[in-house]
Image (cartoon, rainbow, N blue to C red):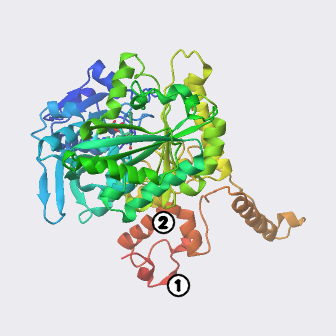
Amino acid sequence: MSTVGLTLEPAQLLQLGVEGQLSLDRSDVGRASVDFGGMTLAEPMAVMRPASAGDVATLVRAAYGSAQGFPVSARGHGHSINGQAQAPGGVVIEMSQYGQAAGHGERSRPVYSQSLGEYYVDVWGGDLWIDILNWTLENGGLAPKSWTDYLYLSVGGTLSNAGISGQAFHHGPQISNVHELDVVTGKGEILKCSKEQNSELFYGVLGGLGQFGIITRARIALEPAPRRVRWIRVLYSNFTTFARDQEHLISLHYSAHQSERFDYVEGFVIVDEGLINNWRSSFFSPRNPVKISSIGSNGGVLYCLEVTKNYDESAGGLVDQEVEALLKKLEFIPASVFMTDLPYADFLDRVHKGELKLRGKGMWDVPHPWLNLFVPGSRIADFDRGVFRAILGNKTSGPILIYPMNKHKWDERSSAVTPDEEVFYLVAFLRSALPDPDESTQSLEYLSDQNERILAFCDESGIEVKQYLPHQETRAEWARHFGPKWSRFLKLKAQFDPKWDERSSAVTPDEEVFYLVAFLRSALPDPDESTQSLEYLSDQNERILAFCDESGIEVKQYLPHQETRAEWARHFGPKWSRFLKLKAQFDPKCILGSGQGIFPLASFPCSSLLPS
Ligand SMILES: Cc1cc2nc3c(=O)[nH]c(=O)nc-3n(C[C@H](O)[C@H](O)[C@H](O)COP(=O)(O)OP(=O)(O)OC[C@H]3O[C@@H](n4cnc5c(N)ncnc54)[C@H](O)[C@@H]3O)c2cc1C
């Protein structure tokens, strides 16, 4: 959530009278200026640790009420890559554990809901998933259903994106497993929302990149937690077989009983030997060290399928048979089965071990030029050929995850954007750049350039990827990213966080810099040359417009003149529905501005043209 300009003095800010803490301390400001990506630095003026949703609302109301506003950003655990939780010159709200220390009350216990037919728990928007796991396990042996691979992320942070892991094919992303939210909007109101109540806000906020409000409470769906996990990895050298098996496994979600499908399906790509024993794959070693050469891949790319089966000891005898039956149908390299068995909580918290190891080597707080893409299932083989087997070379500087998901488990009403196909893959390039790399392939510049090349390859090959945890530079790129959801996104922004610079009805191109080109010509009544006639100049205007149309140059007319309603709708683009709504609200009889020709007199009574 951000508004422009800063009009608040630090002293005024400190007088807001919040219960929690407002800090101008250099170390607090310094921490809120950076994120996990380590590539952007933006200093806020202050940091707030709220004690309650009321504190968050007080701060946002101050921003909304001030003459020009100032940026306010919720920061969960600061694990963004491109400064998404920063608020340059404004206030960062530290939503995670600091808020709780400042007075956030007792946690709510899980509750069984007859109407939902399941348990749920109400959590603070800044709670970390690891704390929710520990709490729900302790209170009834329950756990959320859908996860991220890493649990030191906040509820608000992952729900603002999607929250995905190997359970998403079956349960959907985390945003599909939330029943209700409390949200502080950009006007400073605290609104409860759900599928039934304020549903526009509910779906808008889920996957909404923090644009419409700050999540202060979320009601998370729970299930009885399994006790143990059988964790299996198998290798492939043939991509087609690998992808076919992955897609087969996620299709079992439709029909199979729990005993006849895996509970988690992921995978990763191995292009260099070092990576097989990296921070995401400590699993292979030290008990099971793997040499790629021993697998018979002849130095090529390998693909690792990763699956799990949850079970309780009481049914321990059956898990072996169930796993065996499922593996029998897959076509991995026979000698490449790696299996381990561990408590459910340890499996969910597996990445933390890797974090501790990297921290120990000073390798955690380095730049992370991560790129996460959703790739349509129909083009994943092309992506393999062009990216894994070509652009990447044989050094990757970090894990590369690849796993498919079922689109119908994603609610289209949310703001999250995915490809237009039922099966799409997450491909996550989770790379670390080294400050003083031995090899140029480990530098930030090299990896960032490679990301650009991957995106350019997709563009040129017509592979319609969508970025997950998106980062775009221009408004045009954002419009393209959101596609058909863009106009709703803008509408929700205007509704719930209106203090931004797009409130006017003026229409401009979707780019930061655009030119005015003004043809200020006069036609002569009796011209010596035909090029001075009204007919000639009018025709030339038409040709200019046609040329722009054919060349895909998305011009907008200034002082617009259009002939038809369809042309007006196209002119206003995403602002059209709001334009109609405002007309209906403030000039429902279409008395005003008829000379513009948007609502001509002939269209009286015009109420039929307008939304009720
Ligand atoms: C090591 C690591 C592993 C990861 N693994 C996965 C994974 O397996 N699956 C996955 O889906 N993602 C994963 N991520 C990405 C992660 O989900 C996102 O980066 C997420 O935004 C980080 O959460 P955070 O709490 O740190 O959010 P922040 O970085 O603090 O914030 C992210 C965005 O959410 C907004 N925001 C934060 N809190 C709120 C709130 N309460 N209300 C509204 N908006 C809010 C911020 O303003 C910002 O725009 C991983 C990231 C890292 C660093």
- Residue 55 in view of the camera: yes
Q: Quadrant of the C terminus?
A: bottom left
Quick one: 609 or 248, which is closer to the camera? 248
Where 214 sits versus 533, above or below? above
Rendering quadrant holding ligand 1:
top left
Where 289 sits versus 170, above or below? above
Give percent across and percent down for residue 335: 50, 38
Give the secondary structure at mark 1. helix
* Residue 65: quadrant of the picture: top left
Q: Is residue 298 left or right of residue 349?
A: right
Q: Residue at 79% x, 71% y: name it.
A: 535
- Residue 185 in view of the camera: no
Residue at numbered disc 2:
576
Mark number, residue 282: none
Instruction: For marks 1 and 2, give the CA distance.
Output: 20 Å
Residue at numbered disc 1:
602
Give the secondary structure at mark 2. helix
Instruction: Identify residue type, mark 1.
Output: Ala
Give percent across and percent down for residue 415: 40, 55
Give percent across and percent down for residue 425: 50, 50
Instruction: Identify residue type, mark 2.
Output: Trp
